[in-house]
Image: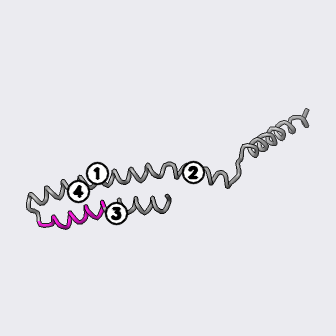
Amino acid sequence: MQKMQFKIPLILTALLLLSAAAVAQDGNAGISAATTQVRSYFQSGVNLMYAIGAIVGLVGAVKVFNKWNSGEPDTGKVAAAWFGSCVFLVVVATVLSSFFG
C-alpha cells in the first residue's frame, strides 16, 4: 500500500508534464503569430494618433485665438508650442507606419 501511494503522484506529475509538452508550440510560430496580430492593430493605432493630433490642433487653435483676442504678449510662443505638438504627432505616426508598414 505504501508503494502505491508513492506511484500515484509520480504518474500524475508525468501525465501533467506530457500534456504541457503536447500543447506547447514552436517558438517561431508563436513569434510569427504575435507579429501578425500586432500588425493588424497597427493601422488602427496610426488612425488614432491622427485623430488625437486633430483634437489637439483644434484645442490649441481655440487657446491661441483666445490669447490673441485678449492681447496677451506670449501668443506666438503658445502658437508655436501647439503647432509643434501637432506636427510631432503627425510625423511620429507617419514614421511609424513607414517603419512597421
Nearer the camera: disc 2 or disc 4: 2
Q: Residue 81 appears in which quarter of the rendering?
A: bottom left
Nearer the camera: disc 1 or disc 2: 2
Name the residue tied to disc 2: 36
Q: Tell which of 4 and 97 is nearer to you.
A: 97
Sequence-wise, the earlier of marks 3 and 2 is 2
Name the residue tied to disc 4: 60
Real-space Cα distance between discs 3 and 2?
A: 27 Å
Q: Which mark is residue 55?
A: 1
CB-based contact (under 8 Å), mark 4 and mark 3: no
Q: Residue 11 appears in which quarter of the rendering?
A: top right
Magenta span has 80? yes
Real-space Cα distance between discs 4 and 1?
A: 8 Å
Residue range of the region highlighted in magenta in the rendering? 73-86
Helix, strand or loop status at disc 3: helix
Our reading of the magenta stretch's main secondary structure is: helix
Residue occupying image coordinates x 57% and y 53%: 35
Sequence-wise, the earlier of marks 4 and 3 is 4
Whole-percent x and y of residue 46?
A: 41, 53
Total numbered circles: 4
Q: Tell which of 90 and 56 is nearer to you.
A: 90
Sequence-wise, the earlier of marks 4 and 1 is 1
Helix, strand or loop status at disc 1: helix
For this view, does 95 lie left or right of residue 13? left
Whole-percent x and y of residue 89?
A: 35, 59
Q: Amino acid at mark 4?
A: Gly
Name the residue tied to disc 3: 88
Q: Amino acid at mark 1?
A: Ile
